[in-house]
Amino acid sequence: MELFYREMGEGKPLVILHGLFGFSDNWQSQAKKFAEYYRVILVDLRNHGHSPWSDKFSYALMVQDLEALFLKLDLKEVILLGHSMGGKVAMHFAQKNASLLSKLIVVDMGVKTYPLHHQHILVAFNNIDLNQLSARSEAESILKQFIDSEGVRQFLLKNLYWIEKGRLSWRVNFPVLEASMTEILSALPEEEVLVPTLFIRGTLSNYILDEDIPVLENYFPDSQLNSIEQAGHWVHAEAPDAFVDCVLGFCLR
């Protein structure tokens, strides 16, 4: 599959992968800062953003998509950064393609299996009938019934756009993602990666617990973990300055 991507800056390549229900636009403000030092490539994974949709969705396929993009752009010595599900894609990619990477950055995602925890989001979307909507605000009103967080609602609503006058559509393939949730939350295969790796977590998030650290070090022996205070799962959005400083401190040394 040929993925949509956008570029800014020049120099050594820094490829950024968004998380579940996200797309490349979510990373624009951070990318502009990274682009002062790097050639930044923001990618839309399959079934997200402007990339094609498919009934098939797995980490193996997303790695293949990314391999095709690396080949197309002749990318080598890449710094690969992934958030949440994108972090899991990045780790899978590193297990198969370590020679293409100089560094790996995984944002608020571990290697373990996670329990189902997106049900309220999926229920909310299943209650939105786009054919009955005449305004984006109507979709937001439905989301409010199921999702308390204003930040999460606004993050999800970025996927809603006018495909034509009077007709709204989603940039994310919710039916396929819902059917693939067990795969999305599955553990990383047990395979060591020697690429220098930075794990970043928010102290208000529970995706990487202290008890997970020894396992991360088994998978990624040349790794470190940085915790960003007063940030949850969307670390880059909730503490942008601290996040950018953390990433650049690792990349530029």
Image (spheres, helix red, strand yellow):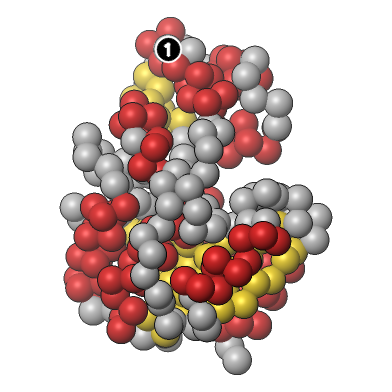
Residue at image x 22%, y 40%? 56
User: The C terminus lies in which quarter of the figure?
Assistant: bottom right
| Residue ranking furthest to the bottom | 253
Do we see residue 106 in this rendering? yes
Residue at image x 20%, y 73%? 71
Do we see residue 171 in this rendering? no
Instruction: Locate residue 157: give its quadrant.
Output: top right
Amino acid type, label 1: Asp
Judging depth in this view, the residue of 73 and 178 nearest the camera is: 178
Q: Is residue 12 above or below residue 153?
A: below
> How far across and how far down the image is residue 34, in percent?
56, 74
> How far across and how far down the image is residue 139, in percent?
54, 19
> How far across and how far down the image is residue 188, in percent?
41, 58
Q: Residues within 10 Å of mark 1 (few under 14, many from 20)?
A: few
> How far across and how far down the image is residue 125, in percent?
48, 21
Q: Is residue 253 above or below residue 213?
A: below
Q: Is residue 200 above or below residue 45?
A: below
| Residue ranking furthest to the top | 132
Residue at image x 24%, y 52%? 61
Judging depth in this view, the residue of 137 and 115 nearest the camera is: 115
To which residue does mark 1 refer?
Answer: 129
Judging depth in this view, the residue of 86 and 163 nearest the camera is: 86
Judging depth in this view, the residue of 193 and 132 nearest the camera is: 193
Q: Is residue 103 left or right of residue 120?
A: left
- Helix, strand or loop status at disc 1: loop
Residue at image x 43%, y 8%? 132
